[in-house]
Image (spheres, rainbow, N blue to C red):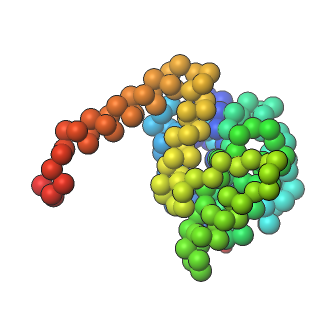
Amino acid sequence: MSSNSSPKVGVIMGSKSDWPVMEHAVTMLERLGVACETRVVSAHRTPDLLFDYAKGAAARGLQVIVAGAGGAAHLPGMVASQTALPVLGVPVESKALKGLDSLLSIAQMPGGIAVGTLAIGKAGATNAGLLAAQIVALQDASVRQAVEAFRDEQTRNVLDNPDPRPE
Ligand code: RP5
């Protein structure tokens, strides 16, 4: 668990080796005050766990699932097939094909089962955390305020530092 309060977002990944990417989703969620849990759930190595996790997620109070995987990245799509919760997929960069395989595996879902696909790697994980928080914010005013404050700060940082040259 990443928080003491009951988790609203589940951040899962196909392997421990995905953590250096997926930790950026958790960092964003924590920054925005969204309670989350993290688990390794593999579509290929632990398919029964995948089904149990996805089927039980809504009843446990999760509102969004962020799922990251690399290569033949079936995790987000299979999770989405077993829950009506929104599933955000993060393509993790693979050694052989640099994550293009992961991206296409996650994005090319057949019509009828939706996975919201983010960018490959750190940016995708960061934005998956942000987007998950924005979904939670639909029903949570404190998270909405945190998202607005984050965006205001980001804007201010750019406007306050217009010179692109290193200091
Ligand atoms: C996928 O296979 C995982 O999501 C990971 O990105 C990739 C490689 O896994 P490991 O062999 O490093 O465990 O299922």
**Residue 146 percent location from the top left of the image:** 45, 28
Is residue 73 positioned above or below 54 on the image? below
- Of the pair 103 and 19, the residue shown nearer to us: 103
**Residue 56 percent location from the top left of the image:** 82, 39
- Of the pair 147 and 34, the residue shown nearer to us: 147
In the figure, residue 155 lies in which quadrant?
top left
**Residue 66 percent location from the top left of the image:** 64, 47
**Residue 153 percent location from the top left of the image:** 32, 34
Q: Inspect this view and state whether residue 60 appears.
A: yes
Is residue 45 positioned above or below 137 on the image? below
- Of the pair 39 and 142, the residue shown nearer to us: 142
Residue at the location (60% across, 24% down)?
A: 138
Q: Inspect this view and state whether residue 75 appears.
A: no
Residue at the location (61% across, 30% down)?
A: 136
In the figure, residue 19 lies in which quadrant?
bottom right
Residue at the bottom extreme, as displayed:
96
Q: How many marks?
A: 0
Residue at the location (67% across, 38% down)?
A: 64
Instruction: Name the quadrant of the N terminus.
Output: top right
Instruction: Name the quadrant of the C terminus.
Output: bottom left
Residue at the left extreme, as displayed:
167
- Ligand 1 occupies quarter: bottom right
Residue at the location (61% across, 55% down)?
A: 90
